[in-house]
């Protein structure tokens, strides 16, 4: 798939089949993330790959919801969740992680997979249990959560979002 087609067709998937990703698919997605540019070529992003049914994913969900049950979990039952962490205090980590997660998202689309970029667990992973989750997620020392992405085979379809070029763009 051409990259502009992937950009045009990609949407946030909020429903996945039970089919697991293959090791080859996971490696392709991670390679796309690793190939993202980083500020001063710091290559500061760490990727933690989780099975959607793992205990730590359930713990993150519980922490996110303050122990309450939500109607749907943060990853919409995707079979794979990738957590991106980066060096705490480095001013460009969020940008670097955002570029890497977009690479993963576009690679997923190009591979016929769906994805959902996730930020809603930031409070859970950088809150009171920050050190606990950093250890559980094998973050390198001094790293913290930046962004996540759920990936799997699509079981929900929607139109990509609309936009207004005239409203959103100024050419000076």
Image: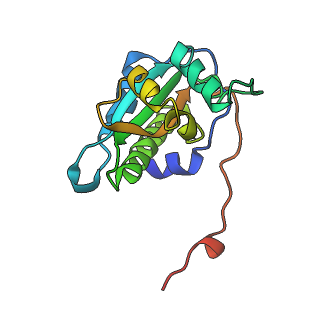
User: Camera-side residue: 61 or 97?
Assistant: 61
**Left or right: 2 in relation to 68:** left
| Residue at x 56% of width, y 74% of height | 169
Image vertical order of residue 115 relative to residue 168, above or below: above
Residue 40 showing in the rendered view: yes
User: For this view, does 54 lie left or right of residue 163?
Assistant: left
Give coordinates of residue 41: x percent, y percent: 21, 51
Extreme-right residue of the structure: 71
Instruction: Point out the residue furthest to the front here.
Output: 128
Where residue 37 appears, as percent x and y from the top left, is 29, 50
Q: Is residue 28 left or right of residue 75?
A: left
Q: Determine if residue 25 is in view.
A: no
Query: Relative to 74, does residue 17 appear above or below in the rendering?
Result: above
Residue displayed at 40% across by 45% down? 97
Q: Residue at x 61, y 71 (%)?
A: 168
In which image quadrant can residue 86 be found?
top left
Query: Residue 104: image x %, image y %?
Result: 43, 38
**Rendering quarter of residue 10:** top right
Position of residue 42 relative to residue 85, above or below, is below
Q: Is residue 8 left or right of residue 76?
A: left
Q: Nearer the viewer, residue 97 or 120?
A: 120
The residue positioned 68% from the left and 29% from the top of the image is: 66
Q: How is the image coloured?
A: rainbow
- In the image as oriented, which residue stretches furthest toward the left? 41
The residue sitting at the bottom extreme is: 172
């Amino acid at each position: 798939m051409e990259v502009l087609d992937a950009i045009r067709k990609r949407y946030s998937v909020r429903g996945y089949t039970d089919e697991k990703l293959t090791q080859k698919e996971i490696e392709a997605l991670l390679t796309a993330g690793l190939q993202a540019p980083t500020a001063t070529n710091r290559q500061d992003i760490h990727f933690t790959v989780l099975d959607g049914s793992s205990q730590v994913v359930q713990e993150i969900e519980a922490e996110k919801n303050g122990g309450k049950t939500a109607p749907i979990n943060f990853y919409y039952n995707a079979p794979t969740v990738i957590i991106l962490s980066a060096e705490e205090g480095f001013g460009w980590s969020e940008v670097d992680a955002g570029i890497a997660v977009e690479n993963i998202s576009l690679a997923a689309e190009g591979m016929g997979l769906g994805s959902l970029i996730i930020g809603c667990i930031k409070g859970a992973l950088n809150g009171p249990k920050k050190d606990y989750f950093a250890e559980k997620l094998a973050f390198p020392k001094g790293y913290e959560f930046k962004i996540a992405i759920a990936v799997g085979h699509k079981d929900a379809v929607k139109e990509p979002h609309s936009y207004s070029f005239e409203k959103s763009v100024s050419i000076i």
